[in-house]
Structures are given as structure tokens and as C-alpha cells.
Image (cartoon, rainbow, N blue to C red):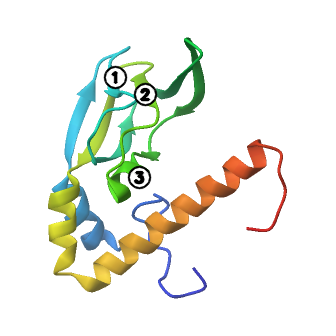
Amino acid sequence: MDGMFPDESDHPLFKYLNAAERAQIEDLGSVLPIASDGFLIREGQKDSALFSVESGRLEVVTVRDGEENVVATIGPGDVLGEVSFIDKSPRTVSVRAVNDSEVRVWDRAELVEHLRSKPDLLAKFAIALSELLVERLRDSVRRQGRVRPV
């Protein structure tokens, strides 16, 4: 981010957080085990939790015209649920475990309340989350084959 904050971590959510700040945020989440073939998210579900894969593999699944399609496979360090976390919209895809997995889950209200009193930490977290969304947007545009400046 052009030197506004130094990169402290290779994890997209914690990119600008030092070890103590990362520990604060990680401690606000809880680790959720998901058995193989179990669902973390179901399309249309209304919640606003944010997730980070701790271990295992998950697949992002959509159903179109009655047919299931795996559109991505994700693993440790990957973040998901960021759109519903930000705007509280229903989930647009389902996410299923390929094998036994663990995912860190953050409750939106609890995380927002914690960050409300820590403006520096909020800024670092918000910028990292924004960069993650921009990266996803650019990837989506590339996959659709449309090349235009964004």
C-alpha cells in the first residue's frame, strides 16, 4: 500500500498487523472444525461472519440450472465471507470441506466493537480487507476475459 503501513505478515487479513495486533484479532475468533463433506456456508444463508482457513481444503460451490459447480478450492490462509461481513448480504455461494478442516470464525459485531476503540488497528484491517476485495474484483474481471482499466 505504498508505504502507508509496512507489510508485517503474508496473511491477507493480517498483512499490516504486527504480531501483537494479529494475536488480538486472532483471539477474537474461534476455531471451528468442519468434517469432510460438511458445509461451512450455504448459499442464501444470512449471517455476517468472516472466515480464514486454518487447515484443510474447502471448495466453493454454486448451483446454476440445478447443476452443482465447484468454482474454487481454498486452503490455509485463504479468507472467505468478506462480502457478507461488510454488507450483511446473504451468502452467494456454498462452501464445503473437501477433507477434515479447521476455519477461524469472527463474529462481525464482536470484531467491529473491538476495532471501534482501536483506530490504528481498524485502519490496518480495513485497508487489508479492501485490498483483498480489489484483488478478487480484478481476478473476476480477468476470468471473464474482459480487460479494462479498473
- Relative placement, left or right, of 76 versus 115 is right
Q: Which mark is residue 39?
A: 1
Look at label 1 and name its amino acid: Phe
Look at label 2 and name its amino acid: Ser
Q: On the image, numbered disc 2 is attached to which residue?
A: 94
For the view shown, which residue lies furthest in the front direction?
Answer: 65
The residue at 47%/84% (across/down) is: 5
The residue at 21%/81% (across/down) is: 118
Residue contact between numbered discs 3 and 1, judged by CB atoms under 8 Å: no
**Frontmost residue, 19 versus 113:** 113
Image quadrant occupied by the C terminus: bottom right
Q: CA distance from mark 3 to mark 1?
A: 17 Å
Answer few, some or many: residues within 10 Å of disc 3's Cα (few below 14, many 20 plus, some between 14 and 19): some
Task: Point out the tag, 2 or 3, that comes first from the N-terminus.
Answer: 3
Q: Position of residue 46 (x, y in %)?
A: 28, 39
Task: Point out the tag, 1 or 2, that comes first from the N-terminus.
Answer: 1
Task: Point out the tag, 3 or 1, that comes first from the N-terminus.
Answer: 1
Q: On the image, numbered disc 3 is attached to which residue?
A: 82
Q: CA distance from mark 1 to mark 2?
A: 7 Å
